[in-house]
Amino acid sequence: MKTFCFLFKEALDDFILKILIIASVLSMVIEVAVAEDAKRKTAWIEGFVILLAVGIVGLVTAANNYSK
């Protein structure tokens, strides 16, 4: 039987999820780098939410495969 961590890693191995992870990290870096000083504190939120959504998808997929 595969461990939950292995299944989570396997779920994140999807091509689309990899693109979303890269895009969210780039979004956070670019937004923080070019944001005005007043908006810099919240510029990272959009990229972080995308990364959080990818994590949730990975967790749900891993939990679904683990229960089988």
Image (cartoon, helix red, strand yellow):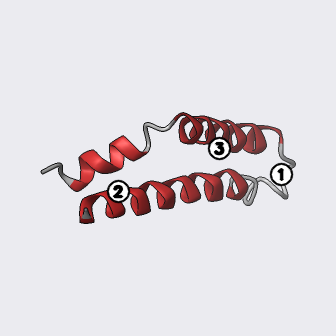
**The C terminus - image quarter:** bottom left
In the structure shown, which secondary structural element does the residue marked by tag 3 occupy?
helix
Q: Which residue is drawn at 67% across and 38% down?
A: 23
- Residue indicated by mark 3: 24
Give the image location of residue 6, x and y in percent: 25, 45
- The amino acid type of the residue labelled 2 equals Ala
The answer to whether residue 48 is above or below residue 16 is: below
- Which quadrant would residue 50 be assigned to in this image? bottom right
Question: Is 26 placed left or right of 36 in the picture?
Answer: left
Q: Residue 37 carries which label?
A: 1
- Which quadrant would residue 9 be assigned to in this image? top left
Q: How far apart are marks 3 and 2 (CA)?
A: 21 Å
Q: Earlier in the sequence, mark 3 or mark 1?
A: 3
Give the image location of residue 47, x and y in percent: 67, 50
Q: Residue 10 carries which label?
A: none
Q: Seen from this angle, which residue lies furthest front?
A: 68
